[in-house]
Amino acid sequence: MFTLLSAALRVLLALSLLCGIVYPALVLGLAQLAFPVQANGSLIERDGRAVGSRLIGQPFHSSRYFWSRPSATGVHAYDARASSGSNLGPTSPALLDAVAGRVRDLRASVSSEAPVPVDLVTTSASGLDPHISPAAALLQVERVATARGLAPERVRALVLDHVEPRTIGLLGEARVNVLELDLALDELR
Amino acid sequence: MSLEAWMRLTLFIAVLVALGWPLGAYLANVAAGKNPGVARWLAPLERGIYRIGGVDSAREMTWKQYALALLAFQLVGVLVLYALQRLQGSLPFNPAGFAGTTPDLAFDTAISFVTNTNWQSYGGETTMSHFVQAVGLGVQNFVSAATGIAVFFALARGFQRASAATLGNFWADMVRSTVHVLLPLSVVLALALVSQGVVQTLAPAATVQLLEPTTDSAGAPVSEQTLALGPVASQVAIKQLGTNGGGFFNVNSAHPFENPTPLSNYLELLAILLLPVAACSAFGRMAVDRRQGRALLATMILIFVPLTALAIGAEERGNPKLTALGADQFASEQQSGGNLEGKEVRFGAFESALWSTATTAASNGSVNSMHDSYTPLGGLAPMVLMQLGEVVFGGVGSGLYGLVLFALVAVFLAGLMVGRTPEYLGKKIERFEVQMASLGILAPCFAVLVGTALAVSTSVGRASIQDPGVHGFSEVLYAFSSAGNNNGSAFAGLNANVPFYNVALGFAMLIARYLVALPVIAIAGTLAAKKKTPESAGTLPTHGALFVGLLVGVVLLVGALTFLPSLAIGPIVEHLQMIAGGGA
């Protein structure tokens, strides 16, 4: 029995070396060589300073920016130290209250009683969703254009420019990266 | 489900089978001790592991020796993983300075990763150091999957051999599965994922300036965002290929750094089901009749597709309560629509729901959306796929051997109907095999139902429930369905990181793994000892549509008889409440 356990321990040790150290180190080396930007978080730099990651969403509140989806992360919205969804069930009163409040705020911001795109009133799985649907972006064009004193057509064109379609027409869904859109917005003169 | 969704689902299954079926030939070669292709280059690594371990990989083992070696390896695995977590504070590569975990969490997590369940009661980026993630959890991702493949190899040899006393060598099977199958696939997948944006670095975090400052829940200003990073890609690759599912981050493959693009999502989805499909093909080849593997794969797909359609349809239709509040859930050119609470825009309702059934059909358990927020029927489909015993694709190796247990029961039932001794793949199925198969099928059911009953009838069990009403019951039922079938996914609203759930779920995972694997090894042993029975006019062919239908029927019947009452109390009632506009 002792020989068996000692053999088991030594095999585990050898495999730990291979799968726990050599394997991640090999992937680390190759990744840093071949894809240095992606391997380190796909950071966006402006004037030598990291202003975000193109994969991680940020919270926006003012009328001058396109808003991201609601986020359920802990201490503040889009807290990328601790990802989290709301995990509220479909009939949960807490969910229904929250959605009702968000619909109200959103309708007030566009002065319209039309149904609002579902992604703008629900929290994402990660709490860090960098995207909104094209419908959610288009809904905000009027507000952003007014706040910035820009022609709505220009802002609308910028949004359409930032729509990423499905990959090869089949994978994923059409979407707009909010941080990239807002950064581009700041560069519109 | 929309027509477009049917086309996307058909395409997915076609791509999956096209990749997985040929891989089965490679798997069968690895089982036979041959070193095809890339395996030739990796053979020195394999020999080095035997040398360090001091094991003779050529020594044939009886089923009892095989089982004993497996148990010894798992016991050592649990002890080492427990120790690594408890000692985390004094170990290297701990840039965030996490302290050791609590005893009950360490116990639960050790069992969880060794049994290939990967249930996580903790948030990865806030609990575990890089060292524990890579050397503790990451290693078990490989070897727990390899152990499942080893048991599958042993079972296949039970059918292959005649009048034999032995089943092969556990060390050889486990090490060869790791080195020749899981390792090369993981390197390729990890690099493909990095190209899409999955991070792979030793840095703990990056700090960036927020474009627009915000405030935290206490009203204090926040102007920076700290992005948790780490060696993620290497862990995500094996977590998918090894049907493990334990994520680096709290939200698993919904996190943009674990699953950033539609392409990374597709690759991970394929990886979840790749080896379970390959196992069907390998089993057919090893049993010297490829049609047998085809019949098992057909059985899996026939159960998978309707339940997947149910989940996708339910999530595409969305939540009528949100429609009533003014949310637009209709799919159009401008939005994918559906129930998007707990889902990412880049995946939408279709790829989220497809993932939810793929990850629960396979015993993977990783998530790219939050199952707790699914519509009741959308959440029912993954729950049922786990409750069917993780035999629809199932775990790497374990799904196949689980389905063979059902096949034994199916031929036994057919034998009873016509009054002949049942046979499967040329072996007579007798009392011992049927007893062991029944044990393997019923043990997980027992763990799920008794565990759920225990939790909802004690105050300590109810205290962790997040949602009021029947949904709270679903959270508990889901947790035990997941642990009691070694899946690992969760209705994450349930606060499972408390001693009661850590211990109860730990035992459920042990029952699900070993009261299935050990009966399978015992069956393999007695089958190997039997002579081959030549096919006769009275033999029930087990490769045709008739048998596939019978097998589907047996799997669904056992599942339905066992779980329908509990599903009626949970998701079915909630569905009626949701569409009737009643309260929670």
Image (spheres, rainbow, N blue to C red):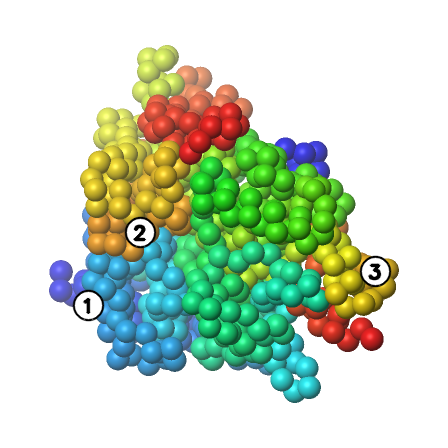
Reading the image, the residue beneath label 2 is: B496
Label 1 marks which chain's residue?
Answer: A
Q: Position of residue B423 (x, y in %)?
A: 36, 26
Mark 3 residue type? Pro
Q: How far across and down, in percent of the image, does residue B334 sit?
A: 74, 48
Please tell me how many numbered marks the rendered image carries: 3
Which marked residue is nearer to the observer: mark 3 or mark 2?
3
- Residue tagged by mark 1? A6
**Residue A152, numbered circle:** 3
Q: Is residue B379 visible?
A: no
Name the foreground residue: B52 vs A77.
Answer: A77
Of callouts 1 and 3, the N-terminal one = 1
Q: Quadrant of residue A113?
A: top right
What is the chain identity of the residue bearing mark 3?
A
Mark 2 vs mark 1, CA separation in Å: 34 Å
Residue at image point 66% right, 80% down:
A45
Judging depth in this view, the residue of A129 and B358 nearest the camera is A129
Helix, strand or loop under label 2: loop
Confirm or deny contact between disc 2 and disc 1 (CB under 8 A): no
Q: Residues within 10 Å of mark 1 (few under 14, many from 20)?
A: some
Q: Is residue A111 above or below residue B560?
A: below
Q: Position of residue B197 (x, y in %)?
A: 60, 68
Could you give the CA–CA distance between mark 1 and mark 3, rounded to whole angstroms?
73 Å
The disc label shown at residue B376, or none:
none
* Disc number lying in front (2 or 1): 2
**Quadrant, the N terminus of chain A:** bottom left
Q: Are marks 3 and 2 in contact (CB under 8 Å)?
A: no
Answer few, some or many: residues within 10 Å of disc 2's Cα (few below 14, many 20 plus, some between 14 and 19): many
